[in-house]
Amino acid sequence: METKHIKISDYSYDLPDERIAKFPLSQRDHSKLLLYKHGEVSEDVFYNIPNHLPKGALMVCNNTRVIQARMHFRKATGALIEVFLMEPAAPTDYELMFQTTGHCAWLCMIGNLKKWKEGSLKRDFSINGHEFTLVASLRRGEALTPEQEKLTTHSGGTNYWVDFEWNTEKVNFAEILEAVGELPIPPYLNRETQESDKTTYQTVYSKIKGSVAAPTAGLHFTDSVLSDLDKHGIVRDEVTLHVGAGTFKPVKSVEIDGHEMHTEYIVVHRHTFERLLEHDCSAIAVGTTSVRTLESLYYMGVYLEHHPDASEDELHVHQWTPYDDGRDGKLVDGITAVKAMQNILDYLDRNNLEALHSSTQIIIAPGYEYKIVKMLITNFHQPQSTLLLLVSAFLKGDWRKVYDYALSHEFRFLSYGDSSLLIP
């Protein structure tokens, strides 16, 4: 069957609510670890994962950090408005955004939008004993410039342009989020964010602020496990993919052709491409976000084969790029992953860049052939989700064996749940 015509109903299973982990274990690395090795399924404890990996292998993690992206404002009428930051608009660069003082703009999802028809929202806050006011103004329709309208349209039409202003130049936007924002835990946990989530919903190696959801496969790692990996000879590297709320977006269409993937922004440094080439472009991916980043790099390298002077924006990987022109997820024009990575490295050299900044909407579904990822560490995903499609593609359709075992052996599911190591 052509990938686009896959029926999402074929990727369903019964997930009782009590199997969804509402909170993490007190010790991250004591979670259960399901092992799928060449069709055989067994289990262990996560802190033993170095024993199951080949010495000298390259492991790639996503070092993004979850921001306190949810803010609440109350109108004079008493109506509560939720403003959920989705992606920076002015400036568009994440690093610059969090350093900004005085004013900035984001593309946001708005809760209770019908109650915010006009006017600004205000919220007082304090930092180090000093009182300040944050003002949020919704801009839409004729108030948007053509370029701003293009940005909101690019987001799928569900995000709105919101300008923020605050009455001090001594406080940057990162500090405001710490004071005003709430950490957005997954909606399926059906509970309020707690103070403990600020720690437990971040990986121990998170560095680069920008995500609105954690790369949860990494939540099992501790400093002790990372040290053991190093002792075991595992080479570790990092990429950055800022996870969007679209990762929770359900597939509502009968066939996946009708599902629109969200755009996510990635940053990959020169040393990562060098390490990939040193390892023949074979990697262990920690989580589906690392998978989407690594596999997207292949298509960026392919594009550069024919368009060596492309801009970073033109390297954006569209949802169906891997399947267009009858490719169906296979190698393009015989270009290997090694050639594709070398193309990107050459591109960085030509443009005097230390890192590649681009974006991806890639959907990985059965029929796709992985180019770089050879082993996958991941949690257990929701029924009928694009993440389950990704796992099925990785296991050549054998996902039910994994999920049946997990369900029958008391594994905990979803973001705060247990882990798996998948080796096809």
Image: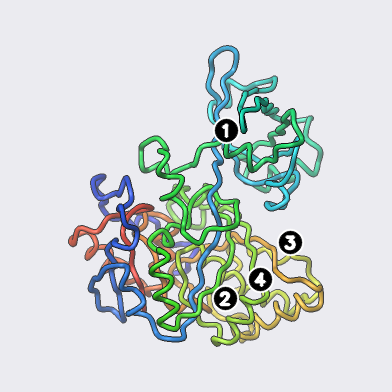
Reading the image, the residue beneath label 3 is 313
Q: Marks 4 and 1, how far apart in space?
A: 32 Å
2 and 4 marks in contact (CB < 8 Å): no
At 73% from the left and 71% from the top, the residue drawn is 354
Reading the chain from its start, which is encountered first: label 2 or label 4?
4
x and y, in percent, of residue 293 in the image: 57, 67
At 27% from the left and 68% from the top, the residue drawn is 45
Q: Marks 2 and 1, how far apart in space?
A: 47 Å
Badge 4 density bin: few <14, some 14–19, many ≥20, Cα 10 Å: some
Q: Marks 1 and 3, how far apart in space?
A: 32 Å
Badge 3 density bin: few <14, some 14–19, many ≥20, Cα 10 Å: few
Reading the image, the residue beneath label 1 is 180
Secondary element type, mark 2: loop
Reading the chain from its start, which is encountered first: label 4 or label 1?
1
Residue 150 picture quarter: top right
Q: How many marks?
A: 4
Reading the chain from its start, which is encountered first: label 1 or label 3?
1
Reading the image, the residue beneath label 4 is 269
- Between 386 and 223, the one nearer to me in the picture: 223
Q: Marks 2 and 4, how far apart in space?
A: 28 Å
x and y, in percent, of residue 193 in the image: 42, 38
Three-letter code, disc 3: Asp
Badge 1 density bin: few <14, some 14–19, many ≥20, Cα 10 Å: some
Secondary element type, mark 4: strand
Secondary element type, mark 3: helix
Three-letter code, disc 1: Val
Q: Marks 4 and 3, how far apart in space?
A: 16 Å
At 60% from the left and 56% from the top, the residue drawn is 208
Reading the image, the residue beneath label 2 is 327
Q: Marks 3 and 2, how far apart in space?
A: 23 Å
Q: Quadrant of the N terminus?
A: bottom left
- Between 324 and 248, the one nearer to me in the picture: 248
